[in-house]
Image: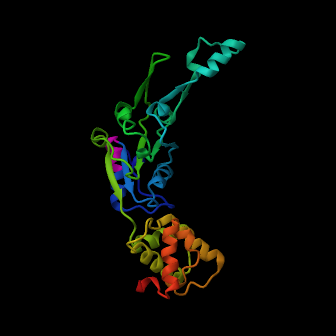
Amino acid sequence: MSNLNVFTGSSGYVVTPELMDAVNVSIALKKPLLIKGEPGTGKTMLAQAIADSLDKPLIVWSIKSTTKAQDGLYLYDTVQRLYDSQFGEGDVSNIGQYIRLGRLGEAVTSENQAVLLIDEIDKADLEFPNDLLWELDRMEFYINETKETVTTKHRPIVIITSNAEKELPDAFLRRCIFHYIEFPDEEKMREIIRVHYGDIDGKLVDNALEAFYEIRRMSDLQKKPSTSELLDWIQALMVSGVSVDDLSEKMPFVGVLLKKNEDIEVMHEIKEKGYSLRRW
């Protein structure tokens, strides 16, 4: 593996040694890296960090419930060709000009090695991962309309994220390197906060983290707050200038942390009973 393709982290992303190793093994073995973890643990941001660290372009393929594998390869613009044939615009016999590459197609044909993020692959239907087995293995695909096989010039670095909404097929999993991003402990979370907010007031960080982890330990929450929500909450506290003394009792701006009405009601009940989180 070339030294140019060794991921060592980036200034804007806190990476564990285990995650760094998983990225570099994926690059060395030329296999996609499948990343799972709680929402807000930095799965999507990892691809940007890799692209920044290795100075490579980032191509993002955001998956939706309606996404098909073909969408990532290419689309044949029959409507434009029909329009041109009716109104005499251009040479309609040149079918190649009506081929529009998808995100995977762009990564395969990129003049420079790219980082391809296939984001939230589990949102698509169950056949979606299986429909990409050949393309991800060989990094090539066939265009029926032009009878052309498109082969990669520089095999992209592929990062795939999943929120575990669906089980992925075994045949697909066998072709991936897998890593689960654990939710950051308090020490790692302090590093993340410093990356985002620099020389932040230590008392604010201490009290915010205490309240944050107390909330996450509550067993009856429907949606636990994530890292991104903690960062937003800290920013709200900084901007507002409210006192950060004993945030566990006051819990200002709780709607920044909790996004379910039922969870907010639980917090209100605690406050109405005069309890702090640490005694709940």
Magenta stretch holds residue 26? yes
**Residue 179 image offset from top left, x and y in percent:** 33, 54
Whether residue 62 is situated above or below residue 85 in the rendered picture: below
Stretch in magenta: 24-31
Color theme of the render? rainbow
Whether residue 44 is situated above or below residue 254 in the rendered picture: above
**Residue 17 image offset from top left, x and y in percent:** 35, 61
Residue 3 seen from this side: yes
Residue at 48% across, 75% down: 266
Number of labels in the image equals 0
Residue at 34% across, 40% down: 30
In the rendered image, the quadrant that contains the C terminus is bottom left
Tell me the chief SS of the magenta region.
helix
**Residue 253 image offset from top left, x and y in percent:** 59, 74
Whether residue 109 is situated above or below residue 20 in the rendered picture: above
Residue at 51% across, 64% down: 228
Whether residue 178 is situated above or below residue 271 in the rendered picture: above
In the foreground, 83 or 106: 83
In the foreground, 224 or 160: 224
Residue at 58% across, 14% down: 94
Residue that extends furthest to the right in the rendered view of this protein:
87
In the foreground, 2 or 67: 67
Where is residue 78, by image quadrant? top right
In the foreground, 89 or 138: 89
Where is residue 97, by image quadrant? top right
Magenta stretch holds residue 5? no
Residue 1 seen from this side: no
In the rendered image, the quadrant that contains the N terminus is top left
